[in-house]
Every structure is written in C-alpha cells, then in structure tokens.
Image (tube, helix red, strand yellow):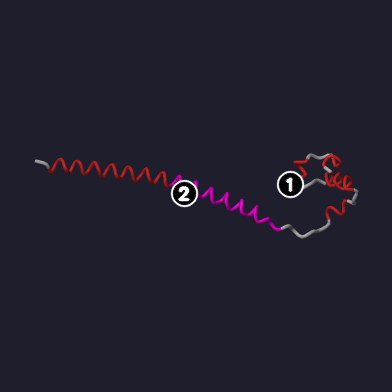
Amino acid sequence: MDTRAGVGHGYTSKLELGHTNPTIAQLTKYAQALRVPIEQLVAAQPAATPVAGDKADEVLAEIERDILIIAHRDQQALGELRNIILAVRERVERASKKARP
C-alpha cells in the first residue's frame, strides 16, 4: 500500500504508531490507494490505549535514568567518603606519632 500511496514504509509505520500526523494531501493518497473516501480515514474513533509494552518501555527508561543519576551521586559520595577516611587516617597517624616517646 505504501507504494500505491506514494509514501515510504517508515512514514506509514510512524503514522500507525501515532508518532506523526498526516497532512490532507497524504490522507488523500492513502484514501486513493485504499479506494475509500477520505472521510472514512478521518472518522472519529476512540483513542487507542497504550500497549502495555510501550508503557513498560517508558517506565524502564525512566528507571534507567534514575539509576544513572543515583550511580553518579554515589560516585560523588564515595569520593567524599574516601577523602574523609584519608583525613581521619592522617589525623590518627599524627596523633600516634605525638603519643610515641
């Protein structure tokens, strides 16, 4: 049908997934390719509910972003803890040296 309508398969796929909206000219091409009146293509239809997989992908992407942010913060916190430990170690060593006769 893409060939008959004179549009690319990628564009049709984007339309089917709801990632883009067609122009009147493109709708006319699809209607002609399907041999139906354009009104049939634009008749009001209930909105499609998101597929569970799409929502799951969205949630997983959000979780992945959160994990990366936490990991970055953890790296910063670990660096700060390392500096604190080193500072405490130096103080302990200095105190030990002073305590020795």
Q: Nearer the viewer, mark 1 or mark 2?
A: 2
Label 1 element class:
loop
Identity of the residue drawn at 75% across and 45% down: 13
Q: Quadrant of residue 48?
A: bottom right
Q: Quadrant of residue 3?
A: top right
* Res 70 label: 2
Say if 86 sits above or below 54 in the image: above
Identity of the residue drawn at 26% across and 45% down: 88
Toward the viewer: 34 or 41? 34
Q: Are there few (<14), some (14-19), or many (20+) residues within 10 Å of tag 1?
A: few
Horizontally, residue 94 falls left or right of residue 14, namely left
* Res 20 label: 1
Q: Mark 1 belongs to which amino acid?
A: Thr
* Res 1 label: none
Q: How far from the left and from the top, in percent, is residue 101?
A: 9, 41
Q: How far from the left and from the top, in percent, is residue 17?
A: 72, 49
In reply to whether residue 18 is colored magenta, the answer given is no
Q: Mark 2 belongs to which amino acid?
A: Ile
Q: How far from the left and from the top, in percent, is residue 18?
A: 73, 50
Mark positioned earlier in the residue sequence (1 or 2) = 1
Q: Quadrant of the N terminus?
A: top right
Horizontally, residue 2 falls left or right of residue 76, namely right
Q: How far from the left and from the top, in percent, is residue 63?
A: 54, 51
The secondary structure that most of the magenta stretch takes on is helix
Q: Are there few (<14), some (14-19), or many (20+) residues within 10 Å of tag 2?
A: few
Identity of the residue drawn at 77% across and 44% down: 12
Task: Give the magenta part as a residue range.
Answer: 49-73
In reply to whether residue 54 is colored magenta, the answer given is yes
Say if 48 sits above or below 90 in the image: below
User: CA gap, disc 1 to disc 2?
Assistant: 34 Å
